[in-house]
Amino acid sequence: MAPFQPSDLVQRLIGRVEMAHIILDIIEIFGTTIGTIGFIRANLPSQPDGGDSAVRIAVGIHDGLSGSDGATPTIWAFNEGQQQIGQTIGSGGTIGAGSFEDITVNKADHWGKQLTYLQIQVDTDGLCIAYTSQRRSDGTQRG
């Protein structure tokens, strides 16, 4: 007895199903990319006034972790030449678990220079940092 041979109709149907899978994969990749871009934009700090830069510090969620919240940190900003070009002293406030704070880094004597490195220090209470992001004075976004 001869082996079963699918008909032309079945072969065309299989080809269309494979094409539909490819199209769905492309749509999924596109949707994931759009979602990622939206997530990044939503997690950047707002544009600061003047020549200053803004840094967003987000704190980890309190999911069984005690003390993930903590004091607002002091931030020192440095350029590519590792020269300090700005700073902000911690406000004495607290950043709560699962939340964030936008901090303006004052570059009074160095307007126009871009910060590339940050040193973050918390003096009084530890802080579980989930992520940081930055908006430079020229609008460039990093994070």
Image (spheres, grey):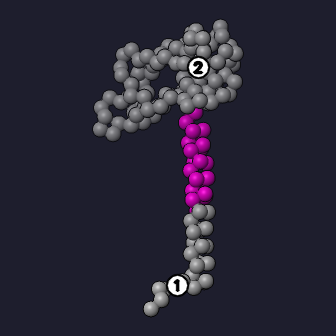
**Crowd band around label 2 with a 10 angstrom C-alpha radius: few (<14), some (14–19), many (20+):** some
Q: Quadrant of residue 115?
A: top right
Q: Where does label 2 land, which residue?
A: 116
Please state which of the two labelled residues, at mark 2 or mark 1, is closer to the viewer: 1
Asked whether residue 27 appears in the rendered view, the answer is yes
Marks 2 and 1, Cα distance to the nearest angstrom? 65 Å
- The magenta region covers 24-44
Q: Is residue 97 left or right of residue 34?
A: left
The percent position of residue 137, horizontal first and vertical second, equals 67, 22
Quarter of the figure with the C terminus: top right
Report helix, strand or loop for mark 2: loop
Q: Hey, what amino acid is under mark 2? A: Thr
Residue 16 drawn above or below residue 31: below
Question: Which of these two is toward me, 128 or 70?
Answer: 128
- Circle on res. 63: none
Q: Where does label 1 land, which residue?
A: 5
Residue at 58%, 27% in the rendered image = 134
Residue at 59%, 63% in the rendered image = 22
The percent position of residue 64, horizontal first and vertical second, equals 29, 38
Residue at 58%, 53% in the rendered image = 29
Residue 128 drawn above or below residue 41: above
Question: Which of these two is toward me, 133 or 19?
Answer: 19
Quarter of the figure with the N terminus: bottom left
Asked whether residue 90 appears in the rendered view, the answer is no
Q: Quadrant of residue 61?
A: top left
Q: Does 35 lie within the magenta span?
A: yes
The percent position of residue 87, horizontal first and vertical second, equals 55, 13
Q: Does 72 lie within the magenta span?
A: no
Q: Hey, what amino acid is under mark 1? A: Gln
Mark 2 or mark 1: name the one nearer the start of the chain.
Answer: 1
Question: Which of these two is toward me, 80 or 91?
Answer: 80
